Image (tube, rainbow, N blue to C red):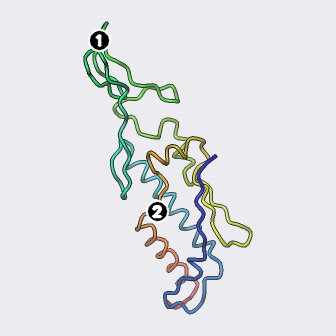
Amino acid sequence: MGLKIIIDDAAFRNLRIGLTADLKDARPVLRKFHVHMLMRTGQTFRALRRGGTYRGVTWDQWADQYTRKTDGVTVPAWGGVAKVRGKGTVQGRKRPSRKRVTPSSSLLRDTGRLAAAAGLTARFDRGGQSLHMITTNVEYGPQQQERRPFLFFAPDDAEAAEQILLEHLRGDGHRI
């Protein structure tokens, strides 16, 4: 089960900005907006690879592995803390790919499945009335979306949608 965002193109069709004609087919506009959102999602994964805030969304950094009861030392996800007994240091936590977390590891990018599937598919209904953005079909996507949102609309996305619409209408010969 993945995430799905449905955008109703009625907002595009009913938008009045001094247009001489209505938008008859929103599919080209919605396709361009879908490409815009794919680009934004990729930027989100790159900008927040180690946690932080980007475009108003915050991702937590790597969670610590544990805090030792013996000496109270907190062991970070990538390890590197001297062992209590024996020689060497504690290794990093294992990821689903069976690789260990390192200080240069990226959040949500272990195998790359989630980032690759985020916003991958655009599907129109029969009448071309709405765009279904199947945002991810990765089974753990909804849980990750709750903790570290990667699919979201920001105010600049609304501005981009308006700009895409205006460019489309200018290209069709409408007076704006």
Query: Could you say where residue 4 lies in the image, as x and y percent from the top left?
Result: 60, 56
Is residue 151 positioned above or below 144 on the image? below
Numbered label tally? 2
Secondary structure state at the residue bearing disc 1: loop
Query: Could you say where residue 143 lies in the image, as x and y percent from the top left?
Result: 52, 43
Residue under pointer 1: 84
Q: Amino acid at mark 2?
A: Phe
Quarter of the image holding residue 133? bottom right
Circle 2 packing at 10 Å, graded few (<14), some (14-19), many (20+), is few
Mark 2 to mark 1: distance in Å?
47 Å
Q: Residue at point 26% right, 22% down? A: 73
Circles 2, 1 touching at the beta carbon (< 8 Å)? no
**Residue 173 vs residue 127, the one in the foreground:** 127
Q: Residue at point 37% right, 26% down? A: 65
Q: Residue at point 61% right, 82% down? A: 23
Q: Amino acid at mark 1?
A: Val
Q: Residue at point 38% right, 46% down? A: 59
Quarter of the image holding residue 35? bottom right
Comes first in the chain, label 2 or label 1 = 1
Is residue 33 positioned above or below 101 on the image? below
Residue under pointer 2: 153
